[in-house]
Image: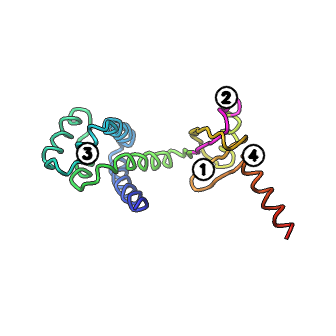
Amino acid sequence: MTARLGTSARRYAEAAFDIATRDGAVEMWRGQLEQARAALSDERVSGVLANAGIPLDERQELVTRLFADALDPHVLNLIQLLLRRGRIELLPRVVDEFVRLDNARRGIVTAEVTSAAALTPREVDELTARLQARTGGRVQLTFREDPSLLGGLTVRVGDRLIDGSVRGRLARLRNQLLATAR
């Protein structure tokens, strides 16, 4: 089910990105989609919009009242389309996909860094420089802390995982020792 939702979100995002690119309005679309996602993160609003017990025309009117003055008509139309198709819960994923497409267009690679403790600014700079050299593009980092790593860090770039954690090194060492013991 999750893969299907991701595929659907990707299709909506690609269509929106095509329109935004055609119109030379990618930045505007990106900003307004992020604004809409923030507004719909309010559980009361998203709950009303996702409630099939409320007539569709009332939910569409709510979207129009919320966004008519704030959003371009094309962006508003995408949100209304998601609402009509009963897919409004996809909006955050659509925005994520749109941002990913825009980042790819701009040559920005995103990487998720997980470390046992917060990195110092110098460590962040060094990691950024290494990843930029490795990927050949600009790198945008997001950070998470996970004390179970014991030390070191992991970096996920797309579908690639670079494991430099102590936990990962210990697991590899264990596997090597078991393999040679056989």
Residue type for callout 3 = His
Q: CA distance from mark 4 to mark 2?
A: 21 Å
Task: Give left or right: position of 22 versus 80.
Answer: right
For the residues carrying marks 3 and 2, which lies nearer the camera in this image? 2
What kind of element bears circle 1? strand
Q: Residue at x 70, y 29 (%)?
A: 122
Q: Is residue 132 magenta?
A: no
For the residues carrying marks 3 and 1, which lies nearer the camera in this image? 1
Residue type for callout 4 = Val
- Residue 132 in the image: x percent, y percent? 65, 43
What kind of element bears circle 4? helix
Q: CA distance from mark 4 to mark 1?
A: 19 Å
Please give the residue where the numbered disc 2 appears in the rendered image: 121
Label 1 crowd (10 A; few <14 / some 14-19 / many >=20): some
Please give the residue where the numbered disc 3 appears in the rendered image: 74
What kind of element bears circle 3? helix
Please give the residue where the numbered disc 4 appears in the rendered image: 166
